[in-house]
Image (tube, rainbow, N blue to C red):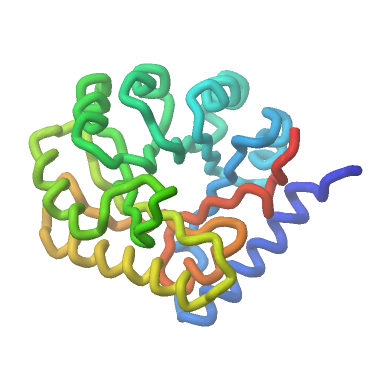
């Protein structure tokens, strides 16, 4: 059974983005799509690039490196999965954004390995689910202060994964919590932590995430599918 083309999926997603932005008087230019290609082939990832997607997201270093070798500078690369400190050396210098900074030891390893500042999102477990990684919201301001001397870390934003649910109010509360925390970080006026971005929203909830302030949405199955 043939999958729908990435191009047709993208067209539908872009219309949904326009609708969501219209609902809250935002510009569509504020929202960037990350095609999450971890479950699909390099060819399917290339199809996304050819369709006009500029950002690709991977969550394992081996999958990332395989696609990076094939596609390289055609894409802006996002590492969106849990990152072990020992794996940092494999991706540093190749990945453009890391979405899963959640501990000082990881920040120190990124700082040590990087030759220039790496754009990082702090992963926040807004929902408090045991199954999810990330810092508790109240831990984030203090954590940022502990890494202030690591000049190869730039905190560009916050990332969260909402509960997998169809309960809209639960989703909105999660995304609003991240937005509120972002505003708190911005008010600290730290040069290394401008925190202008919000990475939130996936295939099932990205429209709600956009209405609550997402600037990067991470779309896998709805865009590229999930089969090789």
What percent of the width, then of the height, locates residue 3?
A: 83, 46
State left or right for residue 44 relative to residue 93: right
What percent of the width, then of the height, locates residue 220?
A: 62, 48
Q: Who is closer to the viewer here, 54 or 154?
A: 154
Which residue is at 52% across, 39% downward? 57
User: Which quadrant would the N terminus be assigned to in this image?
Assistant: top right
- Compared to residue 71, the image places residue 130 above or below, namely below
Which residue is at 52% across, 74% downward? 21
Instruction: Please state the total of marks drawn on the protein image.
Output: 0
- Compared to residue 80, the image places residue 216 above or below, namely below
What percent of the width, then of the height, locates residue 174?
A: 39, 67
State left or right for residue 153 relative to residue 162: left
- Compared to residue 207, the image places residue 66 above or below, namely above
Quarter residue 22 falls in: bottom right
- Residue 180 visible, this orientation: yes
Q: Who is closer to the viewer here, 26 or 150?
A: 150
User: Which quadrant would the C terminus be assigned to in this image?
Assistant: top right
Quarter residue 79 falls in: top left
What percent of the width, then of the height, locates residue 46?
A: 68, 33
State left or right for residue 1 relative to residue 35: right
Which residue is at 56% across, 32% downward? 74
Which residue is at 26% across, 30% downward? 106
């Amino acid at each position: 059974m043939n999958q729908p083309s990435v191009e047709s999926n993208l067209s539908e997603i872009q219309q949904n983005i326009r609708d969501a932005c219209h609902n809250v008087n935002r510009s569509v230019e504020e929202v960037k799509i990350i095609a999450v290609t971890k479950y699909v082939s390099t060819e399917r990832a290339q199809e996304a690039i050819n369709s006009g997607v500029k950002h690709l997201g991977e969550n394992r270093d081996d999958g990332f490196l395989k696609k990076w070798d094939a596609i390289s500078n055609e894409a802006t690369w996002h590492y969106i999965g849990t990152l072990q400190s020992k794996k940092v050396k494999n991706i540093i210098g190749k990945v453009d954004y890391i979405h899963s900074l959640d501990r000082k030891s990881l920040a120190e390893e990124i700082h040590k390995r990087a030759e220039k500042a790496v754009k990082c999102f702090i992963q926040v477990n807004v929902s408090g689910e045991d199954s999810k990684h990330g810092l508790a919201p109240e831990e984030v301001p203090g954590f940022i202060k502990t890494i202030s001397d690591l000049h190869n870390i730039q905190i560009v934003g916050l990332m969260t994964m909402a509960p997998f649910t169809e309960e809209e109010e639960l989703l909105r509360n999660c995304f609003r919590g991240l937005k509120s925390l972002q505003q708190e970080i911005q008010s600290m006026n730290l040069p290394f932590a401008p925190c202008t971005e919000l990475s939130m929203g996936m295939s099932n909830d990205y429209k709600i995430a956009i209405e609550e302030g997402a600037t990067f949405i991470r779309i896998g199955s709805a865009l590229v599918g999930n089969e090789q």
